[in-house]
Image (cartoon, grey):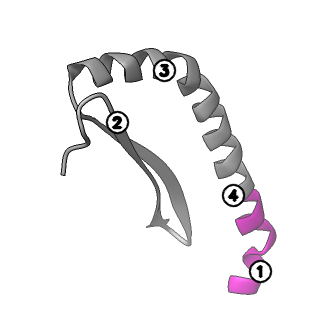
Amino acid sequence: MEPPPGTAAAIWNFRVARHGRGANVHTETRVLCGDDAARRKFLRYWAVVGPFSALIRRRMLATIKDEAESSKAAYL
């Protein structure tokens, strides 16, 4: 389902994949714009917000890593 013209819809998710005895956690964002005008607006928005979003994601992933490693003994 496409968003209405002039709008954008975003989905953000986490994916956990086993890696040896541990796991990797990834984030992904998908954006679907309703038309070219919305796409241009979103690209301007993302040029400003994107770096802060990346910082927030890195911090969240670091927190997940720290929490997982601090409680690792409980799962072994």
Reading the chain from its start, which is encountered first: label 2 or label 1?
2
Percent x, y for residue 45?
48, 20
Residue 76 can be seen in this image: no
Q: Residue at x 20, y 45 (%)?
A: 2
Instruction: Please name the residue that numbered disc 1 is placed on.
Output: 73
Kind of residue sitting beneath label 3: Tyr
Instruction: Please name the residue that numbered disc 2 is placed on.
Output: 8
- Indicate the quadrant where residue 8 lies: top left
Instruction: Please name the residue that numbered disc 3 is placed on.
Output: 45
Q: Are marks 3 and 2 in contact (CB under 8 Å)?
A: no
Reading the chain from its start, which is encountered first: label 1 or label 4?
4
Kind of residue sitting beneath label 2: Ala
Label 1 residue SS: helix
Reading the chain from its start, which is encountered first: label 3 or label 2?
2
**Tag 4: Cα neighbours inside 10 Å, few (<14), some, or many (≥20)?**
some
Q: Nearer the viewer, mark 1 or mark 4?
A: 4
Residue 72 among those drawn in magenta = yes
**Tag 2: Cα neighbours inside 10 Å, few (<14), some, or many (≥20)?**
some
On screen, residue 52 versus residue 45, left or right, reads right
Residue segment shown in magenta: 65-76
- Indicate the quadrant where residue 68 lies: bottom right
Q: Residue 9 versus residue 50: which sits nearer the camera?
A: 9
- Distance in Å between CA atoms under marks 3 and 4: 30 Å
Q: Nearer the viewer, mark 4 or mark 2?
A: 2
Q: Residue at x 31, y 24 (%)?
A: 38
In the depicted structure, whether residue 27 falls above or below residue 39: below
Instruction: Please name the residue that numbered disc 4 is placed on.
Output: 65
Kind of residue sitting beneath label 4: Lys
Q: Are marks 3 and 4 in contact (CB under 8 Å)?
A: no
